[in-house]
Image (cartoon, rainbow, N blue to C red):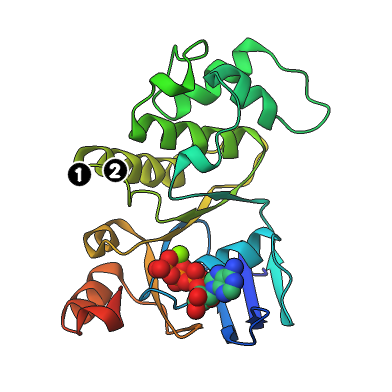
Amino acid sequence: MNAPASPLRVQGLRFRWPNGAPALDHCSFSLPGPGLWMLVGGNGSGKSTLLRLIAGLLQPEAGEIFCTAPPALVFQNPDHQLLLPGCGSELCFHLPKGQRPDLATVEAALARVGLAGFASRPIHSLSGGQKQRLAIASALISGARLLLLDEPTALLDPQSQGEVLALIRKLCNGPSPEGSLPLTALWVTHRLEELELCDGALHLERGRPGRWQKGPALRLELEGLPRGRATG
Ligand SMILES: Nc1ncnc2c1ncn2[C@@H]1O[C@H](COP(=O)(O)OP(=O)(O)OP(=O)(O)O)[C@@H](O)[C@H]1O
Ligand SMILES: [Mg+2]
């Protein structure tokens, strides 16, 4: 029997910004399967550029990206991606083209992220952690099965940070809605303690990933490095 296809395979990726500086070069890795995978690296090591390439917002100069699961980005600051005034309208906006909005679908999506009953809540009344969970619900309702999370907890207090991480952990463990692919998350972080909850982690240095490691082992390794080299 063939091994199941990786949700994401990146092969020989190269990308330069217009000033000519390479952000990624010879960047190759595969996510081993569905689950919660983390990416750490110092400031400017290319993490956000890599997520934007995977999401199709940038085009690589060379190399290939194979996604078997539809991707969606979740930004560090949910205010940069939530577009509409209310939780329900925001989720309806992200429904796949042609799918009629209905309250049951919206309520189910809100319940999946711990926001049951929030359909008529104005977005400005949400806490930072609730906004981030709404951004995750928007990605899920759009049909995404590969979440690309770019430092999703960087602006959150420790409690909300833990809640958002626990939510993604649970979504990646739990059963998928009938007929859909299992969920995969690629989570970028500078918070080394978050590595404890992942299924595996990569260290990106100057646009090149190292080998897959267990999260706690990579945490130990990076805590021994000068801070700039590890995570910025
Ligand atoms: N829009 C842009 N134009 C030109 N250069 C850019 C642009 N965005 C990023 N870069 C450069 O690309 C390199 C990688 O940046 P990137 O934002 O991907 O790093 P990062 O690992 O996400 O860093 P951080 O941890 O600070 O978020 C950096 O040298 C950065 O200055
Ligand atoms: Mg970044």
Quadrant (top left, top right, bottom left, bottom right) of the C terminus: bottom left
Q: Residue at x 38, y 24 (%)?
A: 126
Of 17 and 201, which appears nearest the observer? 17
In the foreground, 14 or 218 = 14
* The one of 27 and 7 positioned closer to us in this rendering: 27
Task: Residue 220: name its quadrant.
Answer: bottom left
Q: Is residue 152 depicted above or below 164 in this figure?
A: below
The answer to whether the residue labelled 2 contacts the one labelled 1, judged by CB atoms less than 8 Å apart, is: yes
Report the residue at 71% width, 61% height from top.
56
> Ligand 1: does it lie within 8 Å of the C-beta at label 2?
no
SS at badge 1: helix
> x, y percentage for residue 156?
29, 43
Q: Identify the residue shown where x is 34% and y is 41%.
A: 164
Question: Quick check: 215 left or right of 66?
Answer: left
What's the residue type where badge 1 is placed?
Answer: Pro
Query: In the rendered image, is residue 4 in sight?
Result: no
The residue at which mark 1 appears reads as 158
Pointer 2: what residue? 156
Which picture quadrant has residue 107?
Answer: top right
Q: Is residue 32 left or right of residue 18?
A: left
Residue for point 46% across, 28% down: 112
The x and y percentages for residue 103 are 62, 11
Mark 1: give few (<14), some (14-19) or many (20+) Cα within 10 Å. few
Position in image of residue 193 (x %, y %): 21, 60
In x, y percent, where is residue 118?
Answer: 45, 15
How many numbered circles are shown? 2
Disc 1 under 8 Å from ligand 1? The reply is no
Callout 2, which amino acid? Leu
Separation (CA) of disc 2 from disc 1: 6 Å
Q: Vertically, is 33 above or below 176?
A: below
Mark 2 neighbour density, 10 Å: few (under 14) some (14–19) many (20 or more): some
Residue placed furthest toward the front: 19
